[in-house]
Image (spheres, helix red, strand yellow):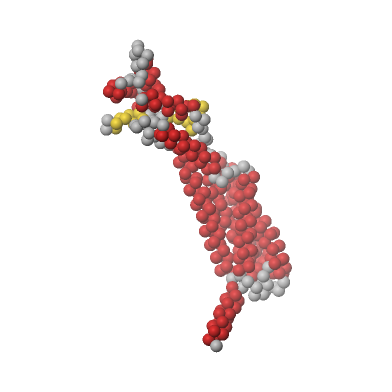
């Protein structure tokens, strides 16, 4: 019964759309052919259970030696182990969103095989190198999301400490968020999935994005001018040339990677170049425009003033309760 069922399993795998071009290597099919060719009786397969090990070892030592050398079948402590080799119908490097549904289908397929197989054939599992890459990519994506949240939170704290102004910190975070969304949208327009390159890049690009916005906001809050427009102009005069110079050098380092042959580095070059371009647009165009329209003036949004007001309100309330 087990021998027949194993042949059926190999046929089910071969006929599945999960296997590429019906490429499969199954020792039991070759064993059946060998038994049939070396016996005159048509019912020679399956062999008697008492003769199975002896016949199998004879087969493996002759025509079936290839299965031994390829680790498809063998014996450990008198127990037989075997593997059915197949080619998964996916590419070597595919995005997680593409790979995971196919891995689930293979898991379901294997579970169904185990559920419909007798004892001794009901502990099968499936494995492929492409699934290892998928798991690593899934971890990278999850870590990328966590990294973005952590980096964004730390950036907000840095902005608060550098400007001591809540409003400017929120404006800068809004600009940084816009940069990240713009770069991700650009990547998807190029047809990229949220794969390994994008997952690594999103954490790094927050670091590139913060720099320019921090400089503009810090120069704005340090300006002694009265009007929003003059404060913004002064900030751009002081930091504009430095930001532009830094952007050009960083863009240049990314552009060098375009000359490489590896897809990973070429895509990374696109990410760096796009990040610098969008960072300049958001920090030098959008953010100044926002500051001219609704930038804080005087003590508006100042943390020290807010703290004093809060402390004064708490003190007044306590004094009122005591009375």
256 vs 25, nearest the viewer = 25
96 left or right of 56 in image? right
Identify which residue is drawn at 41% across, 24% down. 7
Identify which residue is drawn at 32% across, 30% down. 80
The quarter of the picture where the N terminus appears is top left
Q: Position of residue 44 (x, y in %)?
A: 34, 16
211 left or right of 54 in image? right
The quarter of the picture where the C terminus appears is bottom right
277 vs 92, nearest the viewer = 92
Identify which residue is drawn at 59% across, 50% down. 272
Q: Position of residue 79 (x, y in %)?
A: 29, 31
Q: Is residue 116 visible?
A: yes
Q: Is residue 11 above or below residue 127?
A: above
Q: Is residue 137 above or below residue 56?
A: below
64 vs 22, nearest the viewer = 22
Identify which residue is drawn at 70% across, 73% down. 225
Q: Position of residue 175 (x, y in %)?
A: 64, 59
Q: Is residue 252 visible?
A: no
Q: Residue furthest bottom?
A: 323
Displayed quadrant of residue 119: top left
């Amino acid at each position: 019964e087990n021998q027949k069922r194993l042949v059926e399993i190999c046929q089910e795998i071969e006929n599945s759309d999960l296997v590429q071009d019906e490429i499969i290597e199954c020792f039991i099919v070759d064993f059946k052919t060998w038994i049939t060719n070396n016996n005159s009786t048509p019912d020679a397969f399956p062999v008697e259970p008492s003769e199975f090990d002896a016949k199998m070892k004879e087969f493996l030592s002759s025509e079936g030696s290839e299965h031994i050398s390829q680790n498809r079948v063998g014996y450990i402590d008198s127990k037989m182990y075997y593997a059915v080799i197949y080619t998964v119908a996916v590419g070597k490097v595919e995005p997680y969103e593409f790979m995971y549904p196919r891995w689930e289908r293979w898991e379901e397929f294997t579970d169904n095989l185990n559920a419909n197989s007798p004892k001794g054939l009901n502990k099968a599992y499936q494995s492929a190198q492409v699934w290892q890459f998928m798991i690593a990519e899934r971890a990278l994506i999850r870590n990328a999301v966590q990294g973005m949240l952590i980096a964004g939170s730390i950036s907000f704290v840095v902005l608060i400490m550098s400007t001591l102004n809540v409003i400017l910190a929120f404006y800068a975070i809004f600009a940084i968020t816009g940069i990240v969304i713009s770069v991700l949208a650009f990547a998807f327009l190029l047809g990229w999935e949220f794969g390994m390159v994008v997952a690594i890049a999103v954490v790094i690009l927050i670091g590139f994005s913060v720099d320019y916005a921090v400089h503009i906001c810090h120069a704005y809050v340090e300006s002694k001018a009265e009007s929003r427009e003059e404060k913004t102009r002064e900030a751009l005069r002081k930091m504009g040339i430095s930001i532009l110079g830094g952007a050009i050098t960083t863009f240049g380092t990314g552009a060098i990677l375009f000359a490489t042959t590896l897809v990973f580095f070429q895509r990374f070059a696109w990410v760096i170049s796009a990040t610098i371009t969008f960072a300049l647009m958001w920090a030098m165009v959008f953010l100044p425009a926002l500051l001219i329209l609704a930038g804080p003036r005087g003590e508006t949004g100042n943390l020290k003033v807010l703290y004093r007001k809060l402390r004064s309100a708490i003190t007044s309330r306590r004094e009122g309760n005591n009375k």
